[in-house]
Image: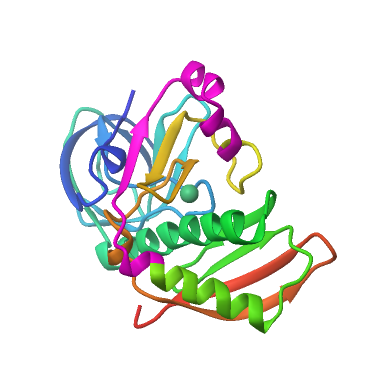
Amino acid sequence: MTRYLFWEDSYAREFETQVMSASGNEIILNSTCFYPSSGGQPSDTGTINGIDVIDVRKREDGEIVHTLQSVGGIGSGDTVKGILDWDRRYRLMRLHSAGHVVSGILSKNFGVRKHTGIQIYEDRVRMGFDIARLDKEVSTSIESEFNRVVAENHQIVAKMLTWELVNSDSSLKTVSEDRYEKIDVPRVLDIVGFDKQLDGGTHVRSTGEIGEIEIIGRENKGRNDKRIIFTIRGL
Ligand SMILES: [Zn+2]
């Protein structure tokens, strides 16, 4: 089974490893820093032995499949070097962590219990949730609360747990089912002293690293489905 280096160290941007299997332009590695698209976070880009990685996905059995631009003579057992497009990945990490902070604010300050989806792009995030009113005042309040949480510089820590623990701990239960991500692993992202939720993504180490957000769009998709689009200033 592939080792998920992107979980062990979300800041690792280069790695060397062996090819477990290769089929056409798809390869599976012993270990990888390439994040497969899931939970609204897009897959990483970069190169393996200088060949562009155009897609990364997690198979149902948990193996990570890298699709390369071309076959490039890479075969089973070869040692290869992977390099992430770090600028892009780091932006995605800041934006994903920002999504969790916004989610925490919505739950704490506005009683939001249900999310309707999240999509993280390279330069913005779109989030949907159940709130009756989403006007300029609410939007400004989310921004200022966000910027306060950034100034407080909370640590962000991810931990693997077991489903038994998740299901028996009521404080974890409340964060799992009604949030926006479909999670198939019992991994918890803890914004220490602020918010906890199940999560499979890659994140920055503290809220101070995210920077301040700016809400650049609001959409009304119905009574129970409002969307915000936000970016990070100077991203
Ligand atoms: Zn997440």
Left or right: residue 49 compared with residue 7: left
Left or right, 227 with respect to 1, comes to right
In the rendered structure, does residue 201 fall within the stretch colored magenta? Answer: no
Percent position of residue 144, x then y:
48, 76
Q: Residue furthest right?
A: 223
Q: Give the answer, above or below, for where 153 lies relative to 36.
A: below
Relative to 24, is 133 on the left or the right? right
The answer to whether any part of residue 75 appears in the image is no
Q: Is residue 66 left or right of residue 113?
A: left
Q: In the rendered image, which quarter contains the C terminus? A: bottom left
Residue 154: in magenta span: yes
Q: Residue at x 49, y 32 (%)?
A: 59
- Which x, y percent locates residue 178? 66, 42
Magenta stretch in the rendered image: 149-175
Which part of the image, by quadrant, shows the N terminus?
Answer: top left
Relative image position of residue 228 (x, y in whole percent): 63, 71
Residue at the location (74% across, 62% down)? 131
Query: What percent of the width, then of the height, locates residue 97?
Result: 41, 57
